[in-house]
Every structure is written in C-alpha cells, then in structure tokens.
Image: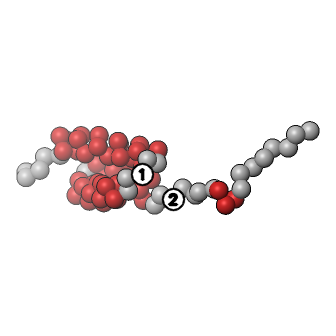
Amino acid sequence: MPSIAFEDADDFIAEPELPEWLVEVPEDLDVCIAQRHFEEAYNLLKRAREFLDKNTNADPVITDIRYASHIIVSVFFFLVPFGT
C-alpha cells in the first residue's frame, strides 16, 4: 500500500493570523450604522483602511475585507448626512 508523503515541516510557511477586530469589521460596521453610531463606524472604517493600506499581501480574507470596506465607505458617505 503506497504511503502519502507530507511536506516537511520546515517547508511550511504559516500565513500571518489576522487580528480578530479586522475579521469582525463588516459585522461591527453593520451594527454601528444600524444603531446610528456614525462616528464610531467612521473610526472603525478609518482603522481598518489604515491596516489594509499597510498590509498589501494577497490574502483572500484581506482582499474580501478590502473590497467590502470600499463598498461600505461608498454607501456610508452617500447615506450619512455630514454637517447637519
């Protein structure tokens, strides 16, 4: 019976773990906006964008969060009346 060869542990490169707060950004933004905590939502968006700008790797989760944040920013600035 043939055996299955596994990669050497030395060849394995661990993906950097994402901060928990970043993974929860889309859900937290939904809650902030639903509760009309717009300043808190803005600060969370700003923090996430700063993190994403510094981390340009092609991690699929970061790519998804980056895409979602662009959509949320567009909707956020369209819906939230600033200066009123």
Which residue appears at 30% of the width and 59% of the height?
50
Label 2–label 1 contact, CB within 8 A: yes
Q: Is residue 11 visible?
A: yes
In the rendered structure, find residue 6 and report the number of the disc placed on it: none
Amino acid of disc 1: Asn
| Colouring style | secondary structure
Dot 1, how many residues are within 10 Å of its Cα: few (below 14), some (14-19), or many (20+)?
few
Q: Secondary structure at mark 2?
A: loop
Which residue appears at 59% of the width and 57% of the height?
13
Distance (Cα) linking label 2 and label 1: 10 Å
Q: Secondary structure at mark 1?
A: loop
Q: Is residue 28 visible?
A: no
Whole-percent x and y of residue 48? 33, 56
Which residue is more in the foreground, 34 or 25?
25
What residue sits right under mark 1 in the picture? 57
- Quick check: 19 left or right of 29? right
How many labels sit on residues?
Answer: 2
The nearer-to-camera label among 2 and 1 is 1
Dot 2, how many residues are within 10 Å of its Cα: few (below 14), some (14-19), or many (20+)?
few
Q: Is residue 23 above or below residue 3?
A: below
Whole-percent x and y of residue 57? 42, 51
Which residue appears at 37% of the width and 52% of the height?
56
What residue sits right under mark 2 in the picture? 16
Quarter-of-image position of residue 72 = top left
Quarter-of-image position of residue 55 = bottom left
- Quick check: 5 left or right of 29? right
Which residue is more in the foreground, 43 or 59?
59
- Quick check: 8 left or right of 55? right
Whole-percent x and y of residue 78? 17, 40
